[in-house]
Amino acid sequence: MLPARNQEAMAAAASGTYSYCSRPRALPARRRYREEEPVRYANLMYDRRVVRGNTYALHALPWVGSPDPLEIQRQREAHRKALARKRAKEQHQSRTPEPVEGRKHVDVQTELYLEELGDRIIEVDVECQTDAFLDRPPTPLFIPAKTGRDVATQIEEGELFDFDIEVKPMLEVLIGKIIEQALLEVMEEEELANLRAHQYAYEELRNAELAEVQRLEEQERRHREEKERRKNQQSQLLQKQKETSEKIAARAFAQRYLADLIPSVFSSLRDSGYFYDPVERGLYYFSFFFTGSIRRLIFFFGGSSSVVSASECCSFKTSESMLHTSSLSDFGRHFKFLNFESSAVAIFRNLTLVPSLRFVKSAVKVFLK
Amino acid sequence: MAHARISAKLPPDIDPTKAAIAFGERALPKLNEELQSPELLTRQRALMALCDLVHDPENVYQAIQLGFLDNLKYLLLDHDSTVREKTTEVLYIMASHNVGRDGFIKYGVIPALSQLLNDPVDICRRNMHRAFEIMAELPRGAVGIVDSSLISSLVLKLKTELDEIQELILDTLSGCLCIEAFEALATGAVSILKEKLTHPSVAIRSKAARVLLGISVPLEGKNIVWDEEVIPVLVSLLEDSDPEVRANAAGALMNATITTQGKYAALSADAIPPLLKLVDDETSKVRLNAIKALTMLSEAPEGRKTLLNHVDLFRGQLNDSSEAVSRAAKIAIKVIEWKP
């Protein structure tokens, strides 16, 4: 019971039911009767605690307050002196030597006769003693006489309150709260489950639609790209066609243009004298070195048209060289002589091409004569 | 000192681990103060009481008004694991209410929660990922998660976490991918997901396929899916026993085969026969995705040739119960019978 009570008290103290200045503790069990004690006799006469002798000469107040150390020292010295006196006195008394080992001194009467100690007073010891203390017996229970009137009261069943009826509202509240909490939690879960189901269905649709959208996008993209490619192909085709037709036209034109080219080239070249008879050219060079001997040439080759044409050519080239020669007039005479007037005219025409033509004129005059 | 409690012996039903909830209006403010107490036991008990109260949306609203979220954010970094567990649980329950989600976005709880990604205690991480998953189901929440640059860390966590947490991460990712997929692609999510496709757990397979569906919506995603040769794995998943897995695999194929190279990859992986089998499946989602995938494949000439023989199958689906399926069947027939 005690530890339980302690614990309770401590628990209560911990929870704050009670607080103490000093903790209550259980008292040890009290003995009802005294146990056997050793009986001590005390005679006043032999009691050491009683002061003996002259009380005046003794220290008036043996231990009063703090004793003076000087006083203490004086006491000690007095004490020592007394002891010393006593010892000296004892030493003066002669003593028999100490007994030898194995022997013992005994007091013996050395008188001759034994003497009866007759004047001994007969003493009789009489004592008187009270009985040992008996423990006091316990007090008898004191039951006072009954006074007053007895009155009793009793609560019958069903008089205070009806438990079932009273407890109903409390129970309702309690259980109501519990069920409310439980319902809340269940509703929460149901709500979540509903939300999830909704989301699931929605997600399904969404995914399907998203995929559809992307597929259509992809399809569009592909078709578009295909179209682009085909258009590109077609345009390339057209371009190629155009190019080819242009090429053909250009070639035809070029052909036609160039068909004329060769004859005109040849004619212009001939006109500029790039085509020459190598014989003539040879003659020319020949005459170039022998400008003064054209007459001789003519005599040599006399009468051939080739000579004339040769001299045509020669004249064209040697016109400059003939500038300084007076052979022009000779030239003309010779031609006249030879009756190649037309060629002579040609020659002179050529000669007129030369810049300094003073003597050409004179030659012409000569010719015309 | 007198106390409100009459007897020192407590009634047997009171939970000693919970703090006493004050009456009416004072309940939440008092808990708010107790949350800031330096004593560990007070905080723990206040959190346990808060967990119960937060199931009621009105309390959630009031709590957010009182500024609970700042205290909870601070408690997320507590040393004691019980405190962290309970805080993450409270946040997760709050996230399941709309008011809570709005509060999360407003007070920036997501970055604070992300500090617990590497928490040693499993329960904390699980609750945190549950909260993320619920946030990702809401578009604004998904935007919040993307903005906190959590996607890359989530993708990397896929490799190392426990299975049930992986499921939660996969759900979070599929929610976030609707917003933005580039970050996930950059972290190499496709290769990780490819491994997960062959995981023994059914839930992980179906969720991984769903994430792949989301990832292959943008063009880069489709190209990477083709690059990593995920298409043959998806084709093999078409014959899985669980309808969810089949539906998600067909959906992922549907998205991945939009590009020409994806189409040819699927055709070479021989995707048409399993897809044809799925057109008659019980689940409407499976049918829908299968028909759509076949539509994609029939854009390619080889696919069209093969599918011309099976047009009757699609005609059978024209009168399907689900409107989306019948629409898809109509489109499919149109595409198959198209002549250039």
Image (cartoon, coloured by chain):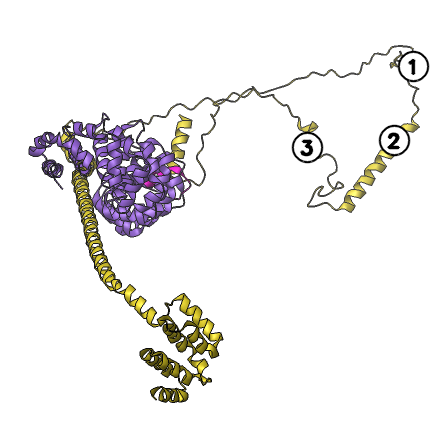
- Closest to the camera, between mark 2 and mark 3, is 2
| Chain shaded purple | B
Residue farthest to the top, as pictured: A113
Q: Quadrant of residue A75?
A: top right
Residue beneath label 2, please? A87
Residue A263, percent from left and from top = 28, 65
**Chain of the residue that carries numbered disc 2 in the rendered image:** A
**Chain of the residue that carries numbered disc 1 in the rendered image:** A
| B275 relative to B86 in the view: left or right | left
- Element class at badge 1: loop
| Chain shaded yellow | A
Tags 2 and 1 touching, CB below 8 Å? no
**Chain of the residue that carries numbered disc 3 in the rendered image:** A
Q: CA distance from mark 2 to mark 1?
A: 24 Å
Q: Amino acid at mark 2?
A: Arg
- The label on residue A49 is 3
- Closest to the camera, between mark 3 and mark 1, is 1
Instruction: Look at the image and give the residue range highlighted in magenta.
Output: B77-88
Residue B56, percent from left and from top = 22, 42
- Element class at badge 3: loop
Which residue lies at the image location 74% right of the left edge and 35% below the top edge?
A: A53
Residue beneath label 1, please? A100
| A66 relative to B224 in the view: left or right | right
Residue A90, percent from left and from top = 89, 28
